[in-house]
Amino acid sequence: MAESTRRPARRLADAPEQVARREEFSPAMRWLIYGILIFGAIIMFLPFIWMVSSACKPQAEINIVPMTFIPQNVSCLQNVTELYENSEDFNRNLLNTAIMTIGRTLGQLITCSLAAYGFARFQFPGRSVLFALCLGLLMIPFQAILIPEYLLIRSLGWRNTFMALIVPGAFSVFALFLLRQAFLQIPLELEEAATIDGANPLQVLWYVTLPLSIPALAAFAVITIQAAWNDFLYPLVVANAEETRVVTIGISLLQGQRDTPWNLLMMGSLIATLPMLVLFVLLQRYFIEGVSMSGVKR
């Protein structure tokens, strides 16, 4: 009996070593994996390199065949000057985009964090069914509800206002799912201790749950801000007036019927892309950690 009981324990002790041996790759396999990843990164980075190169070229040089990535005549400052001359409201477009992005992000932070905390911590009838219905909304294409949403915006008198740009985007099912999964990873004992000390559920959420969910909040911020900043179709439909025009629409208006100044269009795209690049560089560590943490099932 003693020998039979020792064997399973020995197998359990040897299990991590066996798993580690299986996860080890040979140097050739490791270099192959790195080569594939580097090749994929180069392929995905080429459009950005072409955008930067075209933004620093004169229009005539862009049409040269074969194309060159290194500009022969660098004209970055000239392209910026011509961009603002051809698009006088470019700064206004950037400001409108920033207002829409901040409004949507704060709205989703408030609504989705409250809803996610309720789904994660409270027991109520139909909780699982209601959460499944919310996730089912992810299967509905946005284009399928665009016309009904436009009719609702028009009936409320919100067309060509910031209310139309912000309010419908103030809730996201994906953000709800991401934050709920993050809240489930927090030990319940910490929240119970705060409750014993006299904290109500909102205080527990604000002082305990959200500070411990910084990686998930960073991932939520990167995804939400990028989606709002790059949004084109919805603002084009509900708020395409000059006062509420966002930067994506402003850049698209640079295209002409007969001729398109590609150098100016690329410079505008580069200026609009830089804030997102800076945001991702600053939050990439938290973004990766938050996405990986939200995918763990408790």
Image: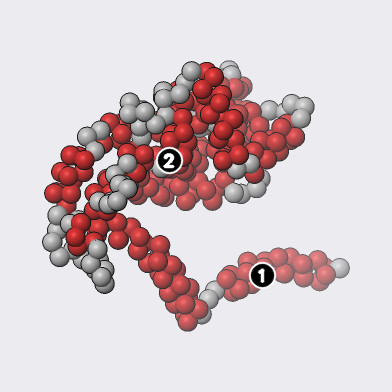
Residue where numbered disc 2 is placed: 232
Expressed as whole percent of the image width and height from the top left, the position of residue 18 reads: 64, 72
Name the N-terminal-most of marks 1 and 2.
Answer: 1
Q: Is residue 183 left or right of residue 8?
A: left
Residue where numbered disc 1 is placed: 14
Q: Nearer the viewer, residue 57 or 107?
A: 57
- Asked where in the image residue 188 lies, by quadrant, the reply is top right
Q: Nearer the viewer, residue 186 or 80?
A: 80
Local secondary structure at mark 1 = helix
Expressed as whole percent of the image width and height from the top left, the position of residue 149 reads: 56, 29
- Residue 94 seen from this side: yes
- Residue 111 seen from this side: no
Question: What is the three-letter code of the residue carrying label 2?
Answer: Phe
**Screen quadrant of the N terminus:** bottom right
Query: Between marks 1 and 2, how big is the CA–CA gap?
Result: 55 Å
Q: Residue at position x 55%, y 47% from top?
A: 293
Local secondary structure at mark 2 = loop
List the single residue furthest toward the bottom: 28
Q: Residue at position x 46%, y 40% from top?
A: 233
Expressed as whole percent of the image width and height from the top left, the position of residue 285 reads: 41, 50
Question: What is the three-letter code of the residue carrying label 1?
Answer: Asp
Mark 2, Cα crowd under 10 Å, few <14 / some 14-19 / many 20+, is some
